[in-house]
Amino acid sequence: MADQQSPFSLLKKKNNNQVMQKKPDKGRPWLKSVLFTLTVLFTIFLLGTMATVGAAAGYVASLVKDEPVREKATLESKISQWSQTSYAYFRDGSPIGRMRTDADRKVVTVKDVSPHVIDALLSTEDREFYTHEGIVPRSIMRAVYQKVTGADAQTGGSTITQQLVKNSILDDRGKTFERKAKEIFLAVRMDNFFSKDKILGAYLNSVYFGPGVTGRNMLGVQAAAQGMFGKDAKDLNLAQSAYIAGMVQRPNAYNPFRGEKYLKNGKRRMKAVLRNMVENKKITEAEYKEAAQFDIKKSLAKKGEKNAYSKYPYITMAVEEEAASILLKADGNDPKKLSKQGKYGSTLQKYRGEVLTGGYRIYTTIDQKVYKAMNKAAQNNDLYASPITYTMNGRTYKNAKEQVGAALLDTKTGATLGFVGGRNFKDSQVNRALGNDAPQQPGSAIKPLLDFGPALDRGIISPESIMIDEPLAHASGVYRNYTRRYDGAMTAREALMKSINIPAIKALRAVGVQAGLDYLRKMNFPVHEHDGEASAIGGFTYGFTPQRMAAGYAMLGNQGKFNEPFMIQRIEDANGKVVYEHKQDPVQVFSSRAAYWTTDMLRDVVRKGTGNYIGARAPGYDLAGKTGTTNNTSDVWFMGYTPDITLGVWIGYDQNKSLPNDKRAKIVWSAIFNAITKKDSKLSPPGHRFKYQSPLPYKCFECNKVKKKEENDGDGNGEKGPQKPPDRQTPPPSNDNPETGNPGGGQQGNGDSPPPPDDPENPGDDQQGDEVGIPQPPPPSEQGD
């Protein structure tokens, strides 16, 4: 029916701004019903002069005066852009599960649905669907007659097209004549624009069926088929199809999961639908009898597919956040600009909703086996102190547990392979590994990235440079070490190995505080404008997550190239189109030589320094790392990496309470690392070694100061001051130099400390100078290592 030929054309093309005075409601309700019906019929059937049609349509026009004239594109958008359930996947393509939403929907076409479903729906809801023009005047008149007379049987007068309009286009769900009038005219307009299969397909995806076996609402026949019977809509048998079709008008009244009463009602309704199919010549009497005897109860889904949130809550929350951020940026939004406007949170939440209901397929970098192994190891209660009860700032915390946050990255790419968000999601939903939920002060774990590494990169020090551990003044007093003593002259290697504070601060001063912080900014660390010299030993305004710290350490193992850590490899829309794919964009932060020799210094940390507990429990691995502890031992860290993987672990209470054991991070790190390598030894084969780089030129730094002091203190017997240490020209064994060097590496000396004991509560005195940072920078004299 062409638009210009339709008796509704005046109304369908009326100006949006046209204002017509609505007539006051007068008379009894049944008279108004009759008037409405007759007006509609006159509008349809009177094909006389335009004046006659205009007079007949006047009343109905007044009812739809606020309805805009919707163009085809607008209507098509309304009936095709459905909310759909999104899914997430592990890196091997196996499913993580459905993203969390209140309802499930999977968009299908008519071809994807069993013919039984189509026949059942058409036989019951709209037998003239393929022949009418959007409405059936006879059915409207019958429905109004039943309403006026109060008939027991109320058959309804809405076609499938009208039901689609009600489900998808009109916001007003009230049973008013105004809404009904809008529904009628939009149905005619829809029929004029779209094919019958297009309308039917949209209808199949729009119908609400109530809660399924999982308790989540079912939207569309595919969700109903899965939620009711655990199968696809194309696989439904005749009885199941009739049951689903019968639920359309009263989904809650016929929902079998509500109890026996409702199942009984549903079966009675199913038989009524089957009888409709017989009358409509879609099935035979024999088929009716067979389907009527089918055991619907036995065929109901026993257990619904769990969504991703119920199985992997930490992963689900992290995927939501990262995917929302990706889509936000893809639409041209600037997160920094939005943050300044105070709109970032609300904007991100909008995109989070799109992630959940956009029908996306989100492919992550998470390794399922490794993720499970990490969490199983980290949730071993034997690794932690018993829960405690304490009072802080007037509030009592009962049965407080030591918490954990851990992140595992691919050293070369920055891909997040696994993480531990906490010991138990039910106890606390805070993700302590990634995101912005719980950044922590890094303590001395920051020293390789902010102090020693930049000083090596700028040629200010070399691993064997002499640095003096001595009282160091600042604006408010004097810096102190964790040990409350000063050990005098030592090499930079030794200072980092023992995690001594004063040399670290001197290194940052020599680089320049802001120049040093720029190295962190290059790696997207959230450096605050007020962060200053106290940052050298871990005193930051905000702190960092294990994932961010791990990304910094991965840079050291990746020849100085930084990769932004990521967890989402690819996002596809509901049609399979790739809307996002991660692309590597490495940033050269340190030179390859500076990165290698920083790594070499950190090898000594795990061989015979503050991390020797780790080294003794990871034999055969080319492993480098650093410990970190903050003031009052409220946060402890271990950051460790091989040429292939980087693992960062933080331990602490959520309420900034001192830990009873400052070695806890090393204990947990070792347990997680061993679980990872046991589960998948190919992730980091023991034989892999960091690519060797030629030695850095020797830098004196403070050797002349020591020499002058010794000359002043000498007894005149010709004693010489300290000499430049010889450069180690022979590299440690590696894939590049397999036959040379010293097992375990290091530019300085040989020899391993004896393995510490196995008791996790008393793992040996490997603390040495390590280490205290600061949640909020206190007077610098109070800052320890």
Image (cartoon, grey):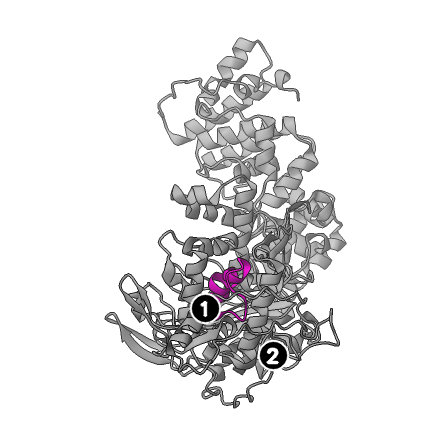
The kind of secondary structure element at disc 2 is helix
Q: Which residue is mark 1?
A: 704
Residue 770 visible in the snapshot: no
Cα–Cα gap, marks 2 and 1: 45 Å
Q: Residue furthest left?
A: 394
Q: Which mark is residue 480?
A: none
Q: Which residues are magenta?
A: 447-467
x and y, in percent, of residue 750 in the image? 60, 82
Residue 302 visible in the snapshot: yes
At label 2, the amino acid type is: Asn
Residue 131's quadrant in the figure?
A: top right
The kind of secondary structure element at disc 1 is helix
At label 1, the amino acid type is: Asn
Q: Quadrant of the C terminus?
A: bottom left
x and y, in percent, of residue 255 in the image? 54, 57
Q: Which residue is mark 2?
A: 674
Height in image: 285 above or below 189?
Answer: below
The question of residue 734 being in magenta is answered with no
Residue 266's quadrant in the figure?
A: bottom right
Looking at marks 2 and 1 on the same chain, the residue that comes earlier in the sequence is marked by 2
Height in image: 405 above or below 339?
Answer: below
Q: Nearer the viewer, residue 155 or 345?
A: 345
x and y, in percent, of residue 32 in the image? 42, 27
